[in-house]
Amino acid sequence: MMEISSLPISASHRSKLLSAGYTTLSSLSAVSPLQLSRDLNVALQEAVDILKVSSESCRVEVQDGDVEFCKGAQTAWDMLSEEQALRHISTGSGDLDSIFGGGIHCKEVTEIGGVPGIGKTQLGIQLAINVQIPYDFGGLGGKAIYIDTEGSFMAERAYQIAEASIWDTFDNFGCQPKEIPEKLKPESFLANIFYFRICSYTEQIALINYLEQFLVEHKDVKIVIIDSVTFHFRQDFDDLAIRTRVLGGMSLKLMNLAKKFSLSVVLMNQVTTKFTEGSFHLTLALGDSWSHSCTNRVILYWNGNDRHAYLDKSPYLRPASVHFSVTGKGIRDATSQCKRVRMM
Ligand SMILES: Nc1ncnc2c1ncn2[C@@H]1O[C@H](COP(=O)(O)OP(=O)(O)OP(=O)(O)O)[C@@H](O)[C@H]1O
């Protein structure tokens, strides 16, 4: 029977496992991440990572070529406890976080739709920064992948948002500027965003197929942002049936990655106008063919001069609408005074 000593994990995790009585891999097969994090007194994410390594090492050859995974059963109570213990990624606005149920959830695909200029890219950059807030300061201490299909990501803007986010986080904890650790500089935050510029739908499909390998090599990535997910599919695809099939496959892959790597996938999407019941409504680009692609969907829209967000789809939260703003510091609770015409 395989021993804990053969697991490719850190020496400190190995000794914590042994001290807590986990001596064989099979002793880990039925334990939930939450239970393990309590037993070992480590962060939930560390427990998830240990269990992932353990289940990978626990593959047994059953017959010629057949491989089976030894996995313990998980109860609904374990699932709920895990979900409650998982940290969410803050949008920078408490109000906006509230309609997502406390921020953007890991293990889920969240779609954010809106008209040009409403702030989708700003929100994407903010999330790529906020996912890096250290664990001790209420964040995930993760890294980000930013897949830019439109060329709208601005590194200079990311620097500004990082500076403000670092300052606000430490300020909330009553820290003085000199107490901010050296490694928590905007430069380091930018260095933790893996940026991919995509210029066609074939590049996008190829990158999504490659993502799993990249994530295996970069396990600390906790968010993948695609801005915007449908841009090249709207521009370059003529055959609608094939487009629907390709998009369906892509969204399934993204959902699986979110679950497997316990990370959040955020898909930015354009909205278009649709004429129904005698009036124009805003609908997400690619409409019905794309409607099952995400777990949660939020639509950003103008209401007079104000930016609002509407929770359009969620498996467990009721529809809600909040006011938010885009400021020099990034996404914040509403204060915006900018002038716009009503669009929804
Ligand atoms: N430094 C800043 N200070 C305040 N507001 C800003 C700043 N930078 C950008 N904005 C606001 O964000 C808007 C642009 O938002 P963003 O690029 O995120 O829109 P978008 O929804 O991604 O649009 P598109 O679909 O065209 O990419 C600007 O019009 C401006 O109102």
Image (tube, rainbow, N blue to C red):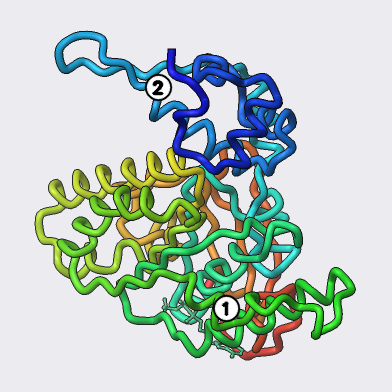
Note whether ligand 1 is within 8 Å of mark 2. Answer: no
Q: Position of residue 262 (x, y in %)?
A: 51, 43
Which of the 4 image quarters holds residue 171? bottom right
**Residue 248 position (above or below residue 79):** below
Dots 1, 2 in contact, CB < 8 A:
no
Q: Mark 1: which amino acid?
A: Arg
The circle drawn on residue 298 is none
Look at 62% across and 90% down and name the residue there: 339
Mark count: 2
Q: Nearer the viewer, residue 53 or 116?
A: 53
Residue drawn 21% across the image and 47% down it = 244
- On the image, the x and y values in percent for residue 32 come to 61, 25
Q: Is residue 247 visible?
A: yes
Label 1 to label 2: alpha-carbon separation:
57 Å
Name the residue that disc number 2 marks: 58
Q: Is residue 271 visible?
A: no
* Residue 198 coordinates in the image, percent (x, y): 25, 71
Image spot of residue 71 (x, y percent): 46, 18
Of 336 and 89, nearer the camera is: 89
The quadrant the C terminus occupies is bottom right
Q: Nearer the viewer, residue 51 or 259?
A: 51
Label 1 vs 2, first from the N-terminus = 2
Question: Disc 1 designates what residue?
Answer: 342
Please state, as top left, top right, bottom left or bottom right, where the N terminus lies in the image. Answer: top left
Looking at numbered disc 2 in the image, what kind of residue is underneath it? Cys
Q: Above or below — where is 75 with respect to 85? A: above
Callout 2 crowding tier (Cα within 10 Å): few <14, some 14–19, many ≥20:
many
Q: Residues within 10 Å of mark 1 (few under 14, many from 20)?
A: few
- Discs 1/2, front: 2
Residue shown at 71%/68% (left/top)? 93
